[in-house]
Image (spheres, grey):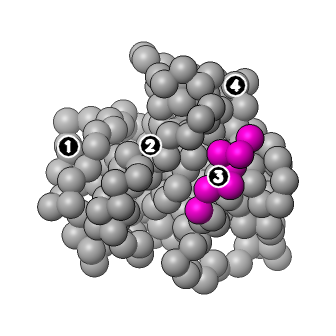
Amino acid sequence: MSGLKSKKRVISIEIDEMPSSKKKSVSLNKKEVHIEIDRLTNSIVNAISGDVFDTEFRKVSKKEIKKNDWFFNWHLELKSGKSEVYKMTIKDNEDIIQGLISLVIDDKFVLVNLVESAKFNQGKKKIYEGVGGNLFAFACMRSFEIGFDGFTAFEAKTALINHYEKTLGAQLVRGQRMFIDNKAAHDLTSRYFKNK
């Protein structure tokens, strides 16, 4: 698995179900991603009303991304040309980006290179829940489409490895490298993408 030695990015996911003693804010640097997996839903859910909204994924262009709306430099990610960068929107409302994900197609798996929920979907006053899980489900679906049986890899923040195991069904490979196998990928994709 020489493909596992790609450029390292740490994906840090804060999970709302964490005991409050373990929940900490994550400081961001160039190699860390802050995305919250608050709960797994069947799409994204309005945090106030409970209304459920189907989502769509499309490749995103530089002009669609306002730098001030994101913690990470997505323009740089698009410029690199090494990854596929997608926007997640609510179906029939593609102008408001709910989250972004960058995927690198490796030899036998999809690598989540960078992933971020929109600022308005983070923290206690978030508008929608389920964004993080939906983004990872899309990565798994992309892996199925390519013929990699859903296998998806990412670098995890050490303190959150157990939570990734519980929420995403991810497994630790070595160090901080985790992967989502065929069964876990099927579970995620069938939850979020029932009609595909």
Sequence-first disc among 4 and 3: 3
Residue linked to disc 4: 182
From mark 3 to mark 1, how far is it between C-alphas?
29 Å
From mark 1 to mark 4, how far is it between C-alphas?
31 Å
| Left or right of 105, for residue 78 | left
Residue linked to disc 1: 93
In the image, what residue type sits under mark 4? Answer: Asn
Residue at the image position 68 percent from the left and 55 percent from the top? 5
Sequence-first disc among 1 and 4: 1
How packed mark 3 is, by other alpha carbons closer than 10 Å (few <14, some 14-19, many 20 or more), is many
Could you say which quadrant of the image residue 171 lies in? top right
Residue linked to disc 2: 44
Residue linked to disc 3: 154
Numbered disc 2: secondary structure: strand
Where are the magenta residues, as a range?
1-7
Please tell me whether residue 132 is drawn above or below residue 56 in the rendered image. below
Q: Which of marks 1 and 4 is in front?
A: 4
